[in-house]
Image (cartoon, grey):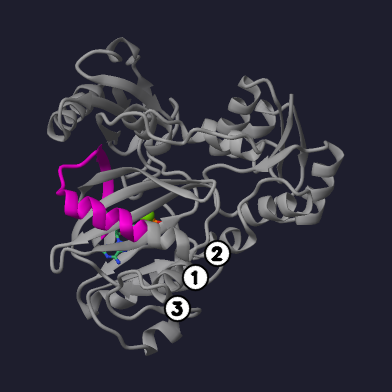
Amino acid sequence: MSNILVIGGGTYQTTLIKRIREFGHNAFCVDKNITCPGFIAATAYRCIDTSDMEACLSYAREIEADGVGTYGATITLPTVSYIGTKLNLPTLNSYAAKIAGNKYEIKKALVEHGCHNKGDLLVFHSVDEALDSGFKYPCAVKPSDGSGSKGVSIVKDPIQYEQAIRYGFAAARFGEIYIEGAIEGDEYSVEAFVNEEKIYVYSIIKTTFNRSGENNTGISYGHTTPPDISVEDEMAIKDEVTKAIHALKINMGSINFDVILSHEDSLPYIIDCGIRIGQNLIASHMVPFSRGVNELDMYISQLLGKTIDAEPKFTKYVSTRLLIAEPGIIKEIKSMQDLIGKEGIIDIVIRKHVGEQQRWYKDKSDNVGWVICCGESPRDAEERAEHARIKLLPRIIVG
Ligand SMILES: Nc1ncnc2c1ncn2[C@@H]1O[C@H](COP(=O)(O)OP(=O)(O)O)[C@@H](O)[C@H]1O
Ligand SMILES: [Mg+2]
């Protein structure tokens, strides 16, 4: 039985905590929020701000930690890396852990290492500074610490620029936005994993958009893997993300990329990189069901310095759809469990509760849940997922 310290007690880290305990280990948790779900799931916890590295390190020493980690988040990675280094435990190196929290710095590193890029890459710390600057259109304006499309705009016309800048800054928690060239093309989410210096690109996942999102950004509402793309495109995407993983010096764990395959020159452009698992069921469902590997279980083994078999086992077609309800208060969510196992439905995951306010669908955190289906081909899986989505939505009653 080992002692693993989990930095952060949010939803994703709670998944890690529960799994550690299912394996029979002790899971300890630190978070500044006393009501976080991780504390309920943990063997024991302490209320500490996760950015207070010394306090977290003292707790790690106190519990005689055999491993330290986090899950689904990048903000907690510097503390994980600091403790791991001090206690000589397997950990993400400090360079990758630090850069993980700043999407501009990541993009800059990728460009410096020869990853594909279009247009200027600029960083701003005030609205005035951004408004005084000139650059080419179309461009993407984004907060350096964003997630779930918050604060992101694609500016196609100079008239949209000022609003995009203000929208970006409103979401920029540490007051920094950046601008890069906008790429026109098909978008893919790419899930990769690093183990003992070997890079595994598990899944290339076609993203389907609901274009009703604000500011010209694509807000995803479905994913399908493996996609219907040529071997050349698949190889080009794999080469590009491999180059990026080397550029960012990532030495273990999961990495999720957003890649656009350009309609103009057919090259893959990395437009986003999270040094963490892919969300929207990617790591929890899509990779296990389509490739036969479980990133969560492998990560726990990595934290404890165990040898793992990270090779994918098979390739199967799966597709997901976000379940997006009308705005209002959720009055009832009728049971859906009877449908699992029928018409290709592998699982249905609901994350909202009755009584919760359902916002107008604006970013990736506004969905009520997801459905995942399998199929004989990318198209078959996608059609089943779409069919399931239409069948399930009337079971979510919003008033
Ligand atoms: N350079 C770009 N070119 C074209 N579309 C982009 C670009 N950057 C972002 N987008 C669109 O906006 C979405 C959200 O931007 P992203 O950088 O992935 O932020 P987030 O952290 O919110 O995922 C992307 O999934 C993509 O559809
Ligand atoms: Mg993204």
Which residue carries the number 3 mark?
123
Which residue carries the number 2 mark?
99
Quadrant containing the N terminus in the rendered view: top right
Q: Give the range drawn in magenta.
A: 217-241
Q: Which of marks 3 and 2 is in front?
A: 2
Disc assigned to residue 105: 1
Please report contact status of discs 1 and 2: CB closer than 8 Å, yes or no.
yes
Residue 18 in sight = yes
Whether residue 247 appears in magenta in the rendering, the answer is: no
Tell me if the residue at label 2 has its CB under 8 Å from ligand 1. no
Residue 296: percent from left, percent from top: 52, 34
Q: Is mark 1 on a helix, strand or loop?
A: helix
Mark 3 is surrounded, within 10 Å at the Cα level, by few (under 14), some (14 to 19) or many (20 or more) other residues, namely many
Q: Which of marks 3 and 2 is nearer the N terminus?
A: 2
Whether residue 224 appears in magenta in the rendering, the answer is: yes
Give 343 or 106, whichever is nearer the viewer.
Answer: 106
Mark 1 is surrounded, within 10 Å at the Cα level, by few (under 14), some (14 to 19) or many (20 or more) other residues, namely some
Q: Which of marks 3 and 1 is nearer the N terminus?
A: 1
Count of numbered circles in the view: 3
